[in-house]
Amino acid sequence: MMAIKRCLFPERNTIRGLRFPCAVLVLLTCVSTAGLQTARTDEAEPKQTRPRQECFIKPLTFFNEVSWKEAVDISDEYQHVLNQFDSTNGSMLQKYQAPGFSGPGPGTLNPPVKNEDAMIMFLGDMNSINRTGELIDALLDKINQKQKTYYYVSNRYKLFCREQRPAYDALSRMGPNIAHATLRKIAQEPEKENRYYMAKLLCLVLRKKFALLYLEDRQEQVAEDDKLTAKEKTEALARYSEAIAAVKEMKDRVRH
């Protein structure tokens, strides 16, 4: 009778009756915890190994994939963003140079930069001399290349370039930074018309007086350079003389 009773009515409140459910509960708890940790690890791993997000500014090759209208619109948008970026960088640099000062008027003090090492590396990359030099050389090689696309004046997608030469216009907007490379390139450039626009570029960014001074100085350096062959020296001196004569005929730009 007792055996039948035990089968029909098992013990539920005794320790013996709780052994199996407790063991199962502990096992399930361990498995759930391990699963949760694995899930958290799986969620965290992509954050550490995920690729960098695509920059909203497309690479230059993107200009090959769009129409002329879209290319001009993109160029305008890029210029606007870069101007804002440059303004923000200038403000950030001023705060970095003068921590603890807020400038004239009331305001919060400039706090010291927290991630100073990263900021210094960023400022160095943004002012890379090597990249600037490569850009100037590439543009100087195209200085006499005329515009390939023209539209009516009423069309807003017409590009207005100095001398209708995009590379010349781009170099002129870079200012005196292009002087050193341009002075060097004049002595090496075999095409006469290219040399003329290089001389004109120097006159534009340096003004006539200083363009002549720099050209004459380079001419003197070439004349005293013993490492050049007689042919190289003769060609370089002639090209500098030609550039000097061209600049003398040019009008000086007027400052307003």
Image (cartoon, grey):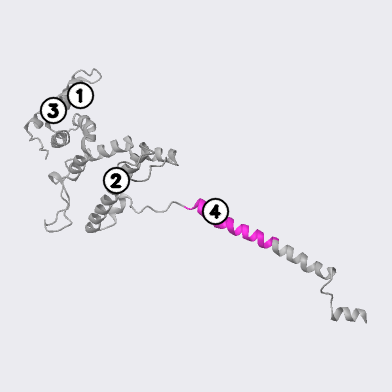
Q: Which residue does the numbered mark 1 point to in the structure image? A: 232
Q: Residues within 10 Å of mark 4 (few under 14, many from 20)?
A: few
Q: How crowded is mark 1: few (under 14 residues within 10 Å), some or many (20 or more)?
A: some
| Amino acid type of the residue tagged 4 in the rendering | Glu
Secondary structure state at the residue bearing disc 2 = helix
Q: Nearer the viewer, mark 3 or mark 2?
A: 2
Q: Nearer the viewer, mark 4 or mark 1?
A: 4
Q: Nearer the viewer, residue 134 or 87?
A: 87
Place of residue 200 in the rendered image (x, y in percent of width and height, measured from the top left): 13, 36
Q: In which quarter of the image is residue 116?
A: top left
| Amino acid type of the residue tagged 1 in the rendering | Glu
Q: Which mark is residue 87?
A: 2
Does the stretch in magenta take in 166?
no
- Cα distance in 3D space between marks 3 and 2: 34 Å
Secondary structure state at the residue bearing disc 4 = helix
**Earlier residue among tags 4 and 1:** 4
CB contact under 8 Å: marks 3 and 1: no
**Earlier residue among tags 3 and 2:** 2
| Amino acid type of the residue tagged 3 in the rendering | Leu
**Earlier residue among tags 2 and 4:** 4
Q: Which residue does the numbered mark 3 point to in the structure image? A: 212
CB contact under 8 Å: marks 4 and 1: no
Q: Which residue does the numbered mark 4 point to in the structure image? A: 45
Place of residue 124 in the rendered image (x, y in percent of width and height, measured from the top left): 37, 37
Q: Residue 105 carries which label?
A: none
- Cα distance in 3D space between marks 4 and 3: 62 Å
- Which region shows up in magenta? 30-50
CB contact under 8 Å: marks 2 and 1: no
Place of residue 228 in the rendered image (x, y in percent of width and height, measured from the top left): 23, 21
Q: Which of marks 2 and 4 is in front?
A: 2
